[in-house]
Image (spheres, rainbow, N blue to C red):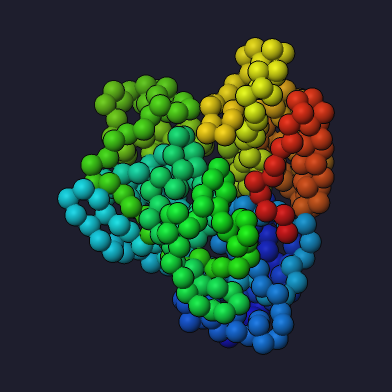
Amino acid sequence: MQFEINKPLKDFNTFHIDAHAEKFICVDNEKSLIEVLTFAKQSNTSTHFIGGGSNILLTKNIEGITILNQIKGIHIIEENEEFVLVNFSSGENWHECVLWAVSKNYGGVENLSLIPGTIGASPIQNIGAYGVELKDVFHSLEAINLKSFEKKIFTLEECNFGYRDSIFKQHEKGNWFILNVRIKLTKNPVCNIHYGNIKDELLKMKVETPCIQDVSKAVINIRSSKLPNPDEIGNAGSFFKNPIVSLSHFEALKSMYPAIPHFIATNGVKIPAAWLIEKNNWKGFKKGDFGVHKNQALVLVNYNNAKGNDILELSSHIITSVQQTFNITLEREVNIW
């Protein structure tokens, strides 16, 4: 076990913020992970975990030990004529796993194509896009307790999934390291094309009877056109959650903004955060090396050498302006370190 000291993290976060880790180590198996965790516990050293680095904003150098998750592996646990249960190790890239499933005609995750990050991060915020959430295909996960090192299987019910939410963002936050995620995929896929611009994109592709491969490609095309490539412009995708407001609040807003876009949710009405931000004229905002992307108001960007605190301060200004205009408090989706 050998740590890298004062490790630059610019290449390990998609915002490309130039921060450093006091101690840095990569783990590619469970044994190595436990060795590092044991050392940290015995030396009373804090630990931080990085997967794809696509959902963090670094605002300072990271003290303690930063652990890069490189635990890889994909294998089928169970299957029959209707479904296949697949175990994905947590260090696997999410999009690569979606492509693996699509290539085998295993349906259920094609609408979640091109979402950045790792498999292990996906249950924490119940990732979702284009009418599908992880919980729709989730079976269970295996995690290790960061204090006792005991392993536990979490079922769908135990994860308590909500909109971009789970038990791992609530009272179990910071208590577990996810080792494996088990996803149940169908061998008889039915395409879900009724959300967003998927239908329009399929028409552009001249596809009349789509298969899941077509849906995946359509989603990739849409996301690529709307979201900047982190390799070219530093960003973490959607910075804010779409807020859910009460029906009465929505009706009041609709009286002032008749064309306000919305989606009916189980606990209210969901309003696109991008619309709220754009209405406050933040889309395309640029100050120095940071700003709001010109094509997508949800995406805050680092054009060159911005500081994490620059982007954090910008997000605070956006939250304040939306609150003042619409009486809606936006919630950050990105984790602030």
Q: Position of residue 89 (x, y in %)?
A: 42, 65
Left or right: where does residue 191 sit relative to residue 167? left
Name above or below for residue 326 compared with residue 70: above
Q: Position of residue 29 (x, y in %)?
A: 46, 76
The quadrant where residue 267 appears: top right
Left or right: where does residue 84 sit relative to residue 168? left
Residue occupying the point 62% across, 24% down: 247
Name above or below for residue 88 compared with residue 302: below
Residue occupying the point 25% across, 61% down: 78
Left or right: where does residue 176 sit relative to residue 199? right
Q: Nearer the viewer, residue 175 or 27?
A: 175
Q: Position of residue 288 (x, y in %)?
A: 82, 41
Q: Nearer the viewer, residue 297 or 328?
A: 328
Q: Residue 138, can we see it?
A: yes
Q: Residue 286, can we see it?
A: no
Q: Nearer the viewer, residue 85 or 303?
A: 85
Q: Position of residue 37 (x, y in %)?
A: 60, 80
Residue occupying the point 73% across, 59% down: 337
The quadrant where residue 249 appears: top right
Name above or below for residue 183 compared with residue 35: above
Residue occupying the point 54% across, 79% down: 149
Which quadrant, please, contains the N terminus?
bottom right
